[in-house]
Image: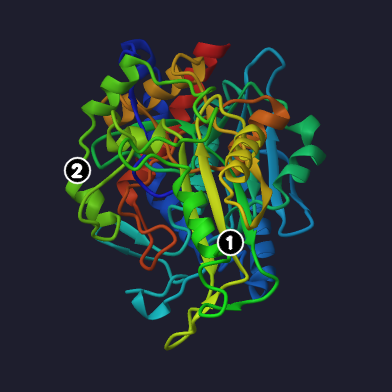
Amino acid sequence: MRAGFAGVLMCGVALPPATLTGMAHDLDDYCTAHQPRFVEELIELLRIPSISADPAHAADVRRSAEHLAARAREAGLTGVEVVETDGHPAVYGERMVSESLPTVLVYGHHDVQPVDPLDAWVSPPFSPEVRDGRLYARGAVDDKGQVYMHLKAVEAHLRTRGELPVNVRMLIEGEEEVGSAHFESLVSTLADRLVADVAVISDTGIFARGVPSLTVGLRGLTGVEVEVRGPSLDLHSGVFGGAVQNPVEALARMLASLKDPESGRVLVPGFYDDVVEPTETERAGYASLPFSEEGFRRDAGGIPETVGEEGWTVLERRWVRPTLEINGIWGGYQGPGSKTIIPAHAGAKISCRLVPAQRPALIAEAVATALRAATPRGVVAEVTVKHGGNPVVTPADHPAVTAASRAMGAVFGKEPVIIREGGSIPPVEVFQRVLGIQSVLVGVGLPDDHIHAPNEKFDMDHYAMGVRVLARLWDEIAEEMG
Ligand SMILES: [Zn+2]
């Protein structure tokens, strides 16, 4: 799950028609009546320490997959199985009602982040506790709680009406928190069981409490590593200094040439060529959000001011504009005291966040070309291009976005803003690239849920609303896409 600060674009979709709002009262009543049990069941799942990053917890990740599979069968999914990968297991289940109905692919993950520092937790991370209407536990909102919303939404339909209005396929991964390393091969293995019209993913949050939002876009990623080599060994700066190119200085000049310090624009030729700019409607939507510059600076570790590409707001710079960042740099002597050398080599890691329709391979090559062109005489630069991921955006007028807007609007009592996020969620990119399926991210977490941190929590009102949103969503998708 990616932390708060989603992107945005005001959704032009009207609030739900009264007929559809009324249609879901049976579902609402069921969810409300059974909510205490929904909480108890989630607590049982949260007791399992399925930390995918820690090999010592491998058996727990498997136990969490098996537990979830059993609950999926109880909810009414069929063909449920724990699916092996070369890493941790996933869970697959489906309910295929009719070929004539739209098919939705639900994605989530059952693994969780590590829990350090343990002493910062008010209650132990795997002893779930409800305090002030919030359930505290590792994985409460990221992502076990939000996966569980989907199971309960299916249950609500089957217990109140006997059948779902759409076909549902569910794939719950066990390696999201370690980079979804085997996800693409998992998807290829299951490809014939993942055929769907749209993917619905609940692994994100809303913009702010009281500001419901739907995420439809994520940035892509690419990167390069550059190594600059001069002399074959560190040289004495007195004996050789003044006549030899310094690799650290050369690297600094090369890196500085990539960006204009005044405008904040990336100067790599071709960098912006394929960028699709947001529409005026989208920008108006972003501007309408209750964004606090001061709060952002605080969340960014107390920075004195924000910077970025001229002509764009902070939200836009993070969601709809591409970036070039130096992630690491090394070279020369960094120990105590001084060592008067001309270093033999220097290096840096660079990454770029991409927006539609930039392509990772093209951008990485453009950056590599710019670095080579900027390499001063007297040194040699070697640039390695890294693997990347495509940016993804589902159009705001996609029927599933319309459906999700109505479902969310009905439950939250307010039309959601359509947002983007600055990060990347590899499965979303894989669904689009490998399966040709677009995604809508219907999450109900809050920016202060402390995902990946001590005292992770899930607001129990949001849990209850999330189940109702997803239950209604299947009605709305049947209406929009049927
Ligand atoms: Zn997550």
Give the crowd class for mark 2: few <14, some 14-19, many >=20 residues within 10 Å: few
The residue under the point 38% across, 41% down is 444
- Which SS class for mark 2? loop
Q: Nearer the viewer, mark 2 or mark 1?
A: 1
Q: Nearer the viewer, residue 203 or 75?
A: 203
Q: CA distance from mark 2 to mark 1?
A: 37 Å
Three-letter amino acid code at the position of disc 2: Ser
Residue 188 % position (x, y): 79, 38
Q: Nearer the viewer, residue 45 or 347?
A: 347
Point out the tag, 2 or 1, that comes first from the N-terminus. Answer: 2
Q: Is residue 251 left or right of residue 460?
A: right
Residue 253 % position (x, y): 48, 52
Three-letter amino acid code at the position of disc 1: Gly
For the residues bearing labels 2 and 1, Cβ distance under 8 angstroms: no
Give the crowd class for mark 1: few <14, some 14-19, many >=20 residues within 10 Å: many
- The answer to whether residue 456 of the structure is visible from this angle is yes
Q: Nearer the viewer, residue 258 or 406?
A: 258
Q: Is residue 175 above or below residue 266?
A: below
- The answer to whether residue 11 of the structure is visible from this angle is no
* Count of marks overlaid on the render: 2
Question: Would you name the residue on which mark 2 appears?
Answer: 292
Residue 471 % position (x, y): 47, 30
Question: Would you name the residue on which mark 1 appears?
Answer: 347
Name the image quarter holding residue 416: top left
- Which SS class for mark 1? strand
The residue under the point 42% across, 88% down is 337
The residue under the point 42% across, 21% down is 277
Residue 16 % position (x, y): 34, 15
The chosen color scheme is rainbow
